[in-house]
Image (cartoon, rainbow, N blue to C red):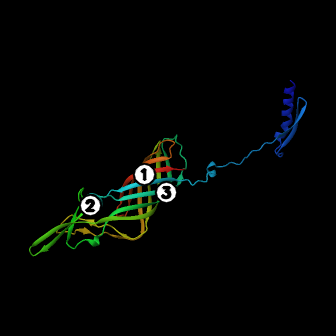
Amino acid sequence: MRQAGLLIFFLASLDPLWASADAPAARDTIVIDGVTLDVEAQVRFDSMMTNPRENDAAFQAAWTVCGLVGNGGPPTGWRYWSGSSDVNVQFSAELLRFPARLDRRKRIQWQAHFDAGFMMTSLTSIDEHAFPDSLIGFLPATAVAPLRMVTSQQFDIGTETDTLDAVTGRTVATAPFAFVGLDAVWGEWHAGVKGGVRFRMQSSQDRPTLNGPTLNGPAFVPGLPRDRGIEPMIQAQIGYQKKRSPWTIQLTGLWISESAQNQWWGFGVKYDAW
């Protein structure tokens, strides 16, 4: 009973200290079995509300790498003639997003975002200035033969027709781009569309349009010259992101207006660091 009384006395003696907001520390004594002990109680608390995201100094973005192949319009697309595909590799970062977080309990949600990055394109090319004057057309590449030029020359004793291998190469260009997009998210799937522009940093000339062998029409149509400038783009994608995983796999389609190769299809991988 003596100890219970001492405990009640101890709590009662501390009650004024809890009620005092100005005293940073309180002192009191307590006697246990005839021994006097000094007691110091101090309560500290922080009433400032903090944003946990502000404590993270790491740069937040969603990074995407996408590889695409030029589709080309058959049968006159360059893949038909050269037997090799145009290639496009994109590197982009999703810098702004609204809303930043999604409520996965909702069935369908919408999310707007701003992306920026750069792309590297590798196009099959050919030097039309090296075409012979006797050229009458082309034969497309096959599994056993490259792209060939067909020539025809008229002599007094007849006409000579010949085929020559056409020398092709690759033209590589890098262009920065920016997109504004809108995604629909349902569960682990998302689909979206975005529009933007890319900046062509150097002047160029399109590839010529090739024709089959003919004696009545042109063997090719020269490519159009292009100055530095902006090209509009539209991109659409559908992706799958497993729950609680930062990785997304997506199918991507890209259309670039006023470009030598304006249709692209491919796959991408996205890492969400938000």
Callout 3, which amino acid?
Asp
The N terminus sits in image quarter: top right
- Local secondary structure at mark 2: helix
Looking at the picture, does residue 247 appear above or below residue 88?
Answer: above
Q: Which badge, 2 or 3, comes first in the chain's sequence?
A: 2
Residue 115: mark: 3
- Name the residue beneath numbered marker 1: 268
Callout 1, which amino acid?
Gly
Q: Nearer the viewer, residue 15 or 66?
A: 66
Coordinates of residue 135 in the picture (x, y in percent): 21, 70
Looking at the picture, does residue 164 appear above or below residue 240?
Answer: below
Q: Which badge, 1 or 3, comes first in the chain's sequence?
A: 3
Q: Nearer the viewer, mark 2 or mark 3?
A: 2
- Name the residue beneath numbered marker 2: 81
The answer to whether 213 appears left or right of 240 in the picture is left
| Residue drawn at the location 14% of the way across and 70% of the way down | 160
Task: Give residue 30's quadrant in the image.
Answer: top right
Q: Are marks 1 and 3 in contact (CB under 8 Å)?
A: no
